[in-house]
Amino acid sequence: MGEITYEMKDLAYCYRIIEVPTDLLSLSADNTRWLSEVENCKVRKMDAMFNAAYFALNLCDNMQGCGGANHTPCLQRKILDYFSGVDNADFCKKIGQSSPFLRADLKVFLQSNSHARFTPRAVARVMHGIASPAYPSTAWSKTHFWGRYTHIDFKEVMEAAKEELKNFVGKDTL
Ligand SMILES: [Zn+2]
């Protein structure tokens, strides 16, 4: 058993190990798995909210008590569906899974910012226009790639960035 604490320090979110466990790798693996579950859960919640709002604004046929700008009935139905475990985040699947320009743009972005030590997530954040402590919008929104790929699924951008980073680092060490 170990003990860790969460803090924000040096332009990063970090975990500090307070009490070192015998199996440090499994603590790290458990932590990674747990954080990725938290992330998936938060994304599902966002999808559910987007889905409800999208339905009310674009798809509601006003047949079940809605009218004009009042979509309380259909929103309530969507919310009840969510809490009873009905998966109706189908509209969110509309988000693009790939773009023919993504890989090429990532390559250019990495080449023109070769001073930075990116992680795939950091690159995907820039492409989605999401600021982070290490990559604040004040500095990074100046790149014309900032927020350019919001129409492509974040995880897909991250995967593509991972591949491009491998190529990039590979070239660097030759
Ligand atoms: Zn409605």
Image (spheres, grey):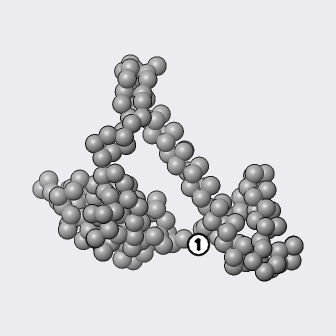
User: Relative to 99, does residue 18 appear above or below in the rendering?
Assistant: above
Which quarter of the figure has residue 29?
Answer: top left
Q: Residue at 66% of width from left, 72% of height from top? A: 54
Q: Is residue 60 left or right of residue 126?
A: right
Closer to us: 136 or 39: 136
Query: Is residue 62 something that shows in the picture?
Result: yes
Image coordinates for residue 123, horizontal then vertical, percent: 33, 60
CB of mark 1 near ligand 1 (< 8 Å): no
Residue type, numbered disc 1: Lys
Q: Badge 1: how crowded within 10 Å, few (<14), some, or many (20+)?
A: few
How many numbered marks have been drawn onto this rendered protein structure? 1
User: Relative to 136, does residue 34 appear above or below in the rendering?
Assistant: above
Q: In terms of secondary structure, where does tag 1 sit?
A: helix
Closer to us: 143 or 93: 143
Which quarter of the figure has residue 50?
Answer: bottom right
Which quarter of the figure has residue 137?
Answer: bottom left
> Furthest-left residue in view?
174
Closer to us: 164 or 128: 128
Image coordinates for residue 32, horizontal then vertical, percent: 45, 40
Image coordinates for residue 159, horizontal then vertical, percent: 40, 59
Question: Which residue was labeled with disc 1?
Answer: 94
Image coordinates for residue 67, horizontal then vertical, percent: 82, 78
Q: Is residue 153 left or right of residue 86?
A: left
Q: Residue at 28% of width from left, 58% of height from top? A: 165
User: Relative to 71, does residue 18 appear above or below in the rendering?
Assistant: above
Q: Quadrant of the C terminus?
A: bottom left
Query: Is residue 105 something that shows in the picture?
Result: no
Q: Residue at 42% of width from left, 66% of height from top? A: 128
Q: Is residue 74 left or right of residue 104?
A: right
Q: Residue at 35% of width from left, 69% of height from top? A: 146
